[in-house]
Structure formats: structure tokens, C-alpha cells
Image (cartoon, helix red, strand yellow):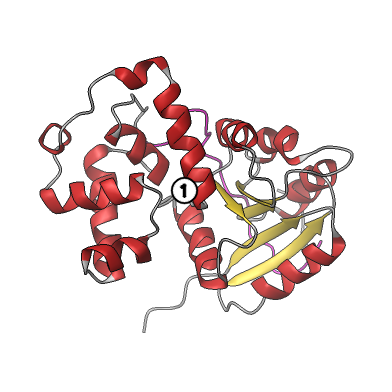
């Protein structure tokens, strides 16, 4: 019998203690997620990430001492980072992603299963979760860029099948895997398999990078421009225990 993979370790960062407590309670209902620590501002988040080496941090934007946008670049060198916030400002979204966030989720626009899936995808390097408003901001920024006027490559140019092109076009509209499955009358597992094949063919590691290639933008192979690929340190099973790496 194949052993279950180790749980994903999470650092919760939000200055609102009520929001933070609710988030932790929500995450701890998932069998494969473990909250190893929490922080109330960006400076504390950096310190806790160095101590705990979580797989991923859920980072708010507006916080005292040091906000999320100012923190994300340094924090992304210690672990993967998903912005989890109420902030829907396009400039903030663009800056956070440019500085290293692997995803951007807005409170009220996701369910627990969707959040759990987002954490797994980011840790495995198979996706860059974006709430609809974040996906729109990314696409608007791409269209506004000077190079956006270049001709978009065809599916044949990218080496994609007709079905893969349909799925990537849906992803470029900001649809989740489940929404794509519903629209194209496929199972969600089939969509995931197609997405993985698209990543391999385009030689990218994130959903956002695949969408950029689909829209005709040059993307370094392996990851989204400006997003470093962090290394994950030793897992920690309890809050604040164990030796530093």
C-alpha cells in the first residue's frame, strides 16, 4: 500500500486576529494541511518562516509594521506564497505577483476545497491560483503591455491539440479546473491531466506562465517571470520546535 504523502505545512499571516483564527480553524479541517504557525505582520512572518520553514505562507496585503506587498519578495525566498486578502486593487495584485507570489486569492471568492487545492497546486508547482479579479488584472496588464500587440501563436505553433487549446483558452479567461470541466463536459481529473500535458509541452511550471505563452508573451521556461523557485526546508510537525536548518 502506497503511504500517504506528508501534510502540507502552512504559515497564516494576517493582522486581524479574528480573520487569522477563522482561517486556521478552516485549514485544520483538511486532513492534508497543517498550520505550523501564524503571524500578525510582514516582519513577524519573515521571522516565523525562517524558524518554521513552512511549505507555503498565506499572506494578507494590508498589515502594520510591514505590509504583504513589501514582504512577499523576501518571504518567497523562504517558502511559496499565496496572497490571501480582501484587497482587489489591480496594481496591488500585479505588484504582488511580480514580486514572487505564486497565487492571489480574495476572501469570499473561494471554498475550502478550492483553497486546499490551491495550496496543493502551489506546493507541487502545478498551478498558480487566481481569484477572478486577480486573473482579470493579470490579463489586463498583459494586454496593456507594448508586446501585447504581437500576434498570438496558434495551437499548432505551441504544439497543442485542439482539446488542449480549448482548455488553455478557458484557463486564460480565469476559469478554475472545475469550471473548465463543467463548460467542456469533461471530468475534473481529465482537465487536470490536460493541464499537466500543456505544462510539459510549453515547458512551464505554472498556470500563469502557460496563459502568458498562450497570449504570445515570452516566458522563461520553468516558471513565471519574476517568481523565484524557492527551496523548501525541513518539515516541522509542531509549532516552534525542532532545530533550525
Task: Give the left or right position of residue 79, taking residue 113 as reference.
Answer: right
Q: Which sits in the foreground, 12 or 16?
A: 16
Position of 57 relative to 64 (above/below): below
Callout 1: 10 Å neighbours few (<14), some, many (20+)? many
Position of 53 relative to 183 (above/below): above
Task: Give the left or right position of residue 109, taking residue 160 as reference.
Answer: right
Residue 135 % position (x, y):
47, 44
Position of 224 relative to 87 (above/below): above
Q: Which residues are magenta?
A: 222-240
Element assignment for label 1: loop
Q: Which sits in the foreground, 104 or 174?
A: 174
Residue 122 % position (x, y):
50, 53
State which quarter of the image contains the N terminus: bottom left
Q: Quadrant of residue 28?
A: bottom right
Residue 33 % position (x, y):
60, 70
Residue 111 % position (x, y):
55, 69
Q: Residue at x 51, y 37 (%)?
A: 137
As drawn, the residue found furthest toward the top would be 146
Residue for badge 1:
128
Q: Residue at x 48, y 36 (%)?
A: 138
Query: Is 230 one of the magenta-colored residues?
Result: yes
What's the magenta bit mostly, secondary-structure-wise?
Answer: loop
Task: Give the left or right position of residue 191, taking residue 74 as reference.
Answer: left
As drawn, the residue found furthest toward the bottom would be 1
Is residue 214 at least partly visible in the picture?
Answer: yes
Q: Residue at x 40, y 27 (%)?
A: 143
Q: Residue at x 19, y 46 (%)?
A: 165
Q: How many dots with numbers?
A: 1
Q: Quadrant of residue 112?
A: bottom right
Amino acid at each position: 500500500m502506497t503511504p500517504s504523502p506528508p501534510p502540507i505545512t502552512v504559515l497564516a499571516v494576517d493582522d486581524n486576529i479574528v480573520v487569522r483564527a477563522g482561517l486556521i480553524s478552516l485549514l485544520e479541517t483538511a486532513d492534508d494541511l497543517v498550520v505550523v504557525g501564524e503571524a500578525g505582520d510582514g516582519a513577524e512572518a519573515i521571522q516565523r518562516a525562517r524558524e518554521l520553514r513552512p511549505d507555503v505562507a498565506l499572506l494578507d496585503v494590508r498589515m502594520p509594521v510591514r505590509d504583504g506587498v513589501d514582504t512577499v519578495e523576501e518571504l518567497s525566498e523562504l517558502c511559496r506564497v499565496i496572497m490571501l486578502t480582501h484587497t482587489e486593487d489591480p496594481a496591488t495584485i500585479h505588484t504582488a505577483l511580480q514580486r514572487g507570489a505564486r497565487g492571489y486569492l480574495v476572501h469570499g471568492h473561494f471554498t475550502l476545497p478550492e483553497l486546499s487545492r490551491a495550496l496543493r497546486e502551489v506546493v507541487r508547482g502545478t498551478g498558480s491560483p487566481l481569484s477572478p479579479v486577480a486573473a482579470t488584472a493579470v490579463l489586463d496588464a498583459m494586454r496593456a503591455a507594448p508586446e501585447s500587440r504581437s500576434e498570438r501563436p496558434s495551437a499548432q505553433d505551441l504544439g497543442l491539440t485542439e482539446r488542449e487549446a480549448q482548455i488553455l483558452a478557458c484557463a486564460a479567461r480565469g476559469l478554475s479546473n472545475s469550471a473548465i470541466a463543467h463548460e467542456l463536459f469533461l471530468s475534473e481529473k481529465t482537465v487536470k491531466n490536460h493541464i499537466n500535458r500543456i505544462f510539459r509541452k510549453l515547458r512551464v511550471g505554472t498556470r500563469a506562465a502557460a496563459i502568458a505563452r498562450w497570449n504570445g508573451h515570452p516566458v522563461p521556461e520553468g516558471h513565471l517571470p519574476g517568481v523565484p523557485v524557492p527551496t523548501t526546508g525541513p518539515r516541522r510537525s509542531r509549532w516552534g520546535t525542532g532545530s533550525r536548518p
